[in-house]
Image (cartoon, rainbow, N blue to C red):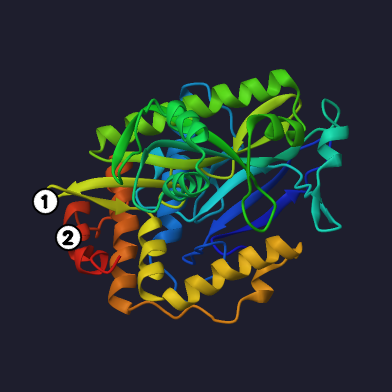
Amino acid sequence: MGSVKDIHITSRKPTERGLGEGNFVFSDGFSVFDWGKMPNRIPNKGAALATMAAWNFEQLGKIGVPSHYLGLVDFDGELVTTDQLEEPRNTMAVSLSRVVEPRFVDGKWDYSYFVDGRGRINNFVIPLEVIYRNGAPQGSSLFRTLDAMEKKGDQQGIKALLGKLGLTSKPKPGDLFPKTGYDFTTKFEPTDRKVDDEEAFRISGLTEEQFLRLKRIRADVVGFGKETARRASMTDFDGKQEYRLFNGRVDLADVALTLDENRFMIDVSGKPVQVSKEFLRQYYKATQKDWYADVERAKEEAQSKGIKDWKSLVRLSPKPLPEKLVSLVGEMYASACNRYTRRKFFKEARDLDKVMQDLAPYMAAT
């Protein structure tokens, strides 16, 4: 059972030779900082994520991006597309691949299954996440990375990192980049660990040709998301993607281009504001500083001591959010889904600009 969505097998389990079938049931729960389920539930969130993700999969399929998406599940159990909907759904049917997690041995993660089986193993979730950056919104890890490099005096590393983004100087929050920057992180480790392209290929389980195919698909997804957001008067600053391999084909998996995977922004009264889960991250960092600091301390301690479960080291627990804020964030998810897809799936949701204006006092806290 997940903090955001649950997976239910509907007809068969995945095997190395064959796909399974199941449903993603999107809940109204949420997670920040890899904590897992937080105290509140956000109304409309599950349906907004499922519907927005389904719409993306359908549009991406039209431009040749393969995925595990099968359709949304209607109230009678039948599969439907977003074109057939009058109102949103929170359940998505997908074909399933095996999840093979690396082993944790002597304080380190062992990817020998993927390394030794390259080119021979089949039907598995690739143990990587693709991270991309079109720009640097508030809260971007890019700023922490650059600050750490500056403290070390790594001017050559800073120059190389900025060069990947087409930059010659350090960006400011809200800046867009001349070039999209790509990174890989691990998927199944308790805390996402950044790996370079060489290490990503080594632990991916993919052949060179398949790894290059993944890179081509990620660019297609980014280009689609960037243009779709632009048409909706939104800016797609960054996001993440996940993939699987089946019968030699690399497919887009999990979900992509939603408010939980991406950081979108819009201009409200001439000021850029976050339209994504990032708002909740920043709010918790600003209003529950002790808990956030405890989480960061526990992650660092676990890494230094080779402890798998960093959450066992956390002493504090997150507190619930104000109910008015919870309601507005739920409306943000619904309104953003409407604007991004250019469909009025959520009939009662106000225009996104008005919702974000009402969220402005809470944003001031971040």
Instruction: In this rendered view, identify the residue nearer to me: 269 or 231.
Output: 269
Question: Does label 1 or label 2 sit earlier along the sequence?
Answer: 1
Hey, what amino acid is under mark 2? Gln
Name the quadrant of the N terminus. Answer: bottom right
Q: Is residue 1 visible?
A: no
In the displayed structure image, the side of residue 245 where residue 80 appears, left or right: left
In the current view of this chain or complex, which residue is farthest to the front? 153
**How many other residues sit within 10 Å of disc 2, few (<14), some (14-19) or many (≥20)?**
some
**Numbered circles on residues, count:** 2
The residues bearing labels 1 and 2 have C-alpha atoms spaced at a distance of 8 Å
Residue corresponding to mark 2: 357
Left or right of residue 146: residue 325: left
Q: Residue at x 49, y 64 (%)?
A: 30
Q: Which of the 4 image quarters holds residue 40? A: bottom left
- Is residue 161 rendered to the left or right of residue 128? left
Q: Position of residue 256 (x, y in %)?
A: 49, 41
Q: Which residue is mark 1?
A: 269
Q: Residue at x 61, y 62 (%)?
A: 2
Q: Nearer the viewer, residue 15 or 199?
A: 199
Front residue of this view, candidates 247 and 166: 166
Q: Is residue 61 left or right of residue 172?
A: right
Asked whether the residues under the numbered discs 1 and 2 touch, taking CB atoms below 8 Å apart as contact, a structural biologist would say yes
Where is residue 175? Give x, y as percent. 29, 39
Residue at 49% from the left image edge and 76% from the top image edge: 291
At mark 2, the secondary structure is: helix
Secondary structure, mark 1, is loop
Circle 1 crowding by C-alpha within 10 Å: few under 14, some 14–19, many from 20: few
- On the question of residue 293 being in view, the answer is yes
Q: In the image, is residue 217 above or below residue 303? A: above
Q: Amino acid at mark 1?
A: Ser
For residue 317, above or below residue 42: below
